[in-house]
Amino acid sequence: MKAGRPALGRPALGRPALGLAAVGLAGILAACSAHAAASAGVATPSRKYLVCDSLAGLCTGVTPKYEPAELLMSGDGSLYAKDVTWSGWGTATATGHGVAEANNCQPDCAEGKPSAHPVTIVLSRPVRWHADMVYSRASFSIPSLHDQEASTTGLIPRPAPSVSVSAP
């Protein structure tokens, strides 16, 4: 191939055209980089939304969970939810649908029979907890049992009380 002649199938680009293309490409890349940097500068770190796995207000010394599939709904374990799926998690109100297992405690809870019932759980009022958010209000409804509860206390995790043991 002789100098100054383009190879077959290739357009001839002179130095001015190559320079213009390089400047244009550099401008596009700079604009994209500036936009990405600006976006990164204003972005806030994402916080996880969590809930205590006991809606009975027993959240001392436990780690809250992210979208739990199971939740304790009574202090004695006779009522709990399982197979819970969530919608709206990470927003001001999350709604879960699952199955509540209720022990009839007849003649007592140790010998009682469990029964399954549809349950709807609503979590709301998220508050900051360390670097994350934790739902501070929970309510649930079990229409087939005519049971409806709301809890606003004890849902924010607290450290377990320290126990001091004196040396003998």
Image (tube, rainbow, N blue to C red):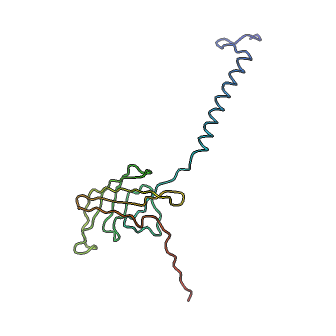
Q: Residue at x 66, y 13 (%)?
A: 11
Closer to us: 12 or 35: 35
Q: Position of residue 126 (x, y in %)?
A: 45, 57
Q: Position of residue 51 (x, y in %)?
A: 43, 59
Q: Seen from this angle, which residue lies furthest right?
A: 3
Residue at 59 percent across and 44 percent down: it is 42
The N terminus lies in quadrant: top right
Q: Nearer the viewer, residue 135 or 60?
A: 135
Q: Nearest the camera: 31 or 71?
A: 31
The residue closer to the viewer here, 42 or 118, is 42
Q: Position of residue 70 (x, y in %)?
A: 37, 59
Residue drawn 64% across the image and 32% down it: 31
Q: Residue at x 29, y 58 (%)?
A: 141
Q: Residue 113 in the image: x percent, y percent? A: 24, 68
Q: Quadrant of residue 106?
A: bottom left
- In the picture as drawn, the residue positioned furthest to the bottom comes out as 168
Q: Specify whether 60 is left or right of 28.
A: left
31 shown above or below 166: above
- In the picture provided, is 14 more to the left or to the right than 163? right
The quadrant of the image that shows the C terminus is bottom right
Question: Where 32 sits versus 138, above or below?
Answer: above
Please state the total of marks drawn on the protein image.
Answer: 0
Quadrant position of residue 53: bottom left
